Amino acid sequence: MPPEDENLAWNLAGREIKQELGRFTDGPIEVKMLSDNKAVVYIDDRDVPAAIGKGGKNVAGIVNKLSIGIDIKPFSEFGPAKEEEAPADGRPSVEGVSANGQSIELNVDKKNLTVMSPENSGRIVDVFGGKEYLFTATVNDNGEIIISKTSGIAQDMLRRYKENESIRLKPVGN
């Protein structure tokens, strides 16, 4: 496949993504096309929740309109993978049970997927599956993030969990 700068379709798709996401962010937007129908977009850390939207509706609208899968990531991750292993804030990240047995737990009932993380009660956290950013959420006072089991993000998390990928929470803005 030709490099990004030689692929006119990828450049056009990148511009379209920037234009669409520009409605939700004031900061810079960096688009990396991975394939004809998949892109990773880096935006200002504070703009991530607005770009994704409640329940992922903003990014889902863009994905449906452009027919390009979009992973939105904060600029704080726009560096070498080593940053992922040792967070800049020096705080240990909470790993999924599949990673090293720390305290995050996934519970599934008839309607919901619940992510349990009591030590993050009341905090806004970024949720990662492996090294991929999934979404941003506020952990309730009971230490839970409750997601409808039928939602795409819950299905994705369950698939990742079953494949022994770590599910991690990282507090935002610390």
Image (spheres, rainbow, N blue to C red):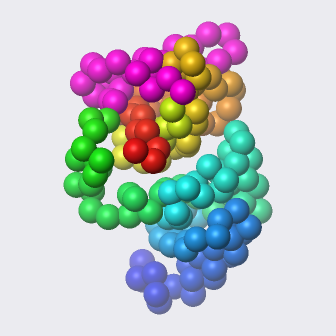
Up the image or down, 88 lies above or below 66; here it is: above
Residue at the image point whose x is 49% and y is 38% from the top: 125
Q: Residue at x 60, y 58 (%)?
A: 47
The residue stretch that appears in magenta: 94-122
Coordinates of residue 61 in the picture (x, y in percent): 76, 55
Considering depth in this image, is 97 or 116 the residue closer to the camera? 116
> Left or right of 57: which side holds 81?
left
Image point (70%, 62%), residue name: 24
The foreground one among 133 and 37 is: 133
Q: Position of residue 2 (x, y in %)?
A: 42, 83
Q: On the rendered image, what quadrant is the N terminus found in? A: bottom left
Left or right, residue 14 beside residue 23? left
Q: Relative to residue 51, is residue 144 depicted above or below?
A: above
The structure residue drawn at horizontal position 55% and vertical position 56%, both measured from the top left corner, is 46
- Judge whether 137 appears above or below 143 on screen: below
Q: Position of residue 44 (x, y in %)?
A: 52, 63
Residue 99 falls inside the magenta stretch? yes
- Residue 69 found in image quarter: bottom right
Question: If the image is split into quadrants, where does the C terminus sit?
Answer: top left
**Can residue 162 be seen from the camera position used here?**
no
The image position of residue 117, as x and y in percent, is 44, 21
Looking at the image, can residue 157 be seen? yes
Left or right position of 16 against 115: right
- Is residue 35 on the magenta stretch? no
